[in-house]
Amino acid sequence: MDKSDFKAKWTQVKGEAQRKWGKLTNDDLDVIEGDREKLVGKLQERYDMSREEAEREVDSFRM
């Protein structure tokens, strides 16, 4: 999914993201605002993932 699609659909799929990554808070999701890089960073932080792992998680996220 490209950056513009990711950002455009974010408000619709925040709940799905929170179900998939339960350690993300509502505040985290508000700060992310559909920014792929911010999501990757938060996944690294919350789940102690490498950047590559977090990018794979985001890339596999189907919205």
Image (cartoon, rainbow, N blue to C red):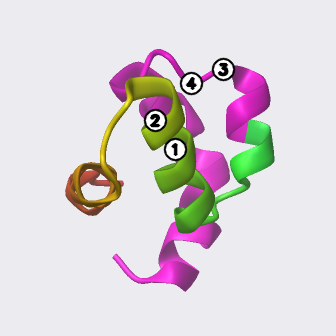
**Contact, CB < 8 Å: mark 1 with mark 2?**
yes
Q: Give the foreground label among 3 and 2.
A: 3
Callout 3: SS: loop
Closer to the camera: disc 4 or disc 1?
4
What residue sits right under mark 2 in the picture?
Answer: 17
Query: Where does label 3 land, which residue?
Result: 25
Residue type (three-letter) at the residue carrying disc 2:
Ala
Residue density around tag 4, few if under 14, some if 14–19, many if 20 or more, within 10 Å: some
Tell me the quadrant of the picture where the C terminus can be found.
bottom left
Residue 24: give its label. 4
Mark 1 packing: few (<14 Cα in 10 Å), some, or many (20+)?
A: some
Dot 3 or dot 1, earlier in sequence: 1
Amino acid of disc 4: Leu
Judged by depth in the image, the label closer to the viewer, 1 or 2, is 2
Labels 3, 1: front one: 3
Residue type at mark 3 is Thr
Q: CA distance from mark 2 to mark 4?
A: 8 Å
* 3D distance between C-alphas at marks 1 and 2: 6 Å
Task: Name the side, left or right, on which 25 lies relative to 31.
Answer: left
Q: Callout 3 environment at 10 Å: few (<14), some (14 to 19), or many (20+)?
A: few
Question: What residue is at 38 percent from the left and 30 percent from the top?
Answer: 48
Question: Where on the picture, by quarter, is residue 37?
Answer: bottom right
Q: Marks 4 and 1, how far apart in space?
A: 13 Å
Whether residue 56 is in magenta: the answer is no
- Bounds of the magenta segment: 1-29
Image location (x, y in percent) of residue 59: 26, 63
Q: Are marks 3 and 4 in contact (CB under 8 Å)?
A: yes
- What amino acid is at disc 1? Val
What's the distance in space between the residues labelled 3 and 4, CA to CA? 4 Å
The numbered mark, 4 or 1, whose residue comes first in the sequence reads 1
For the point 50% across and 26% down, which residue is it?
Answer: 46
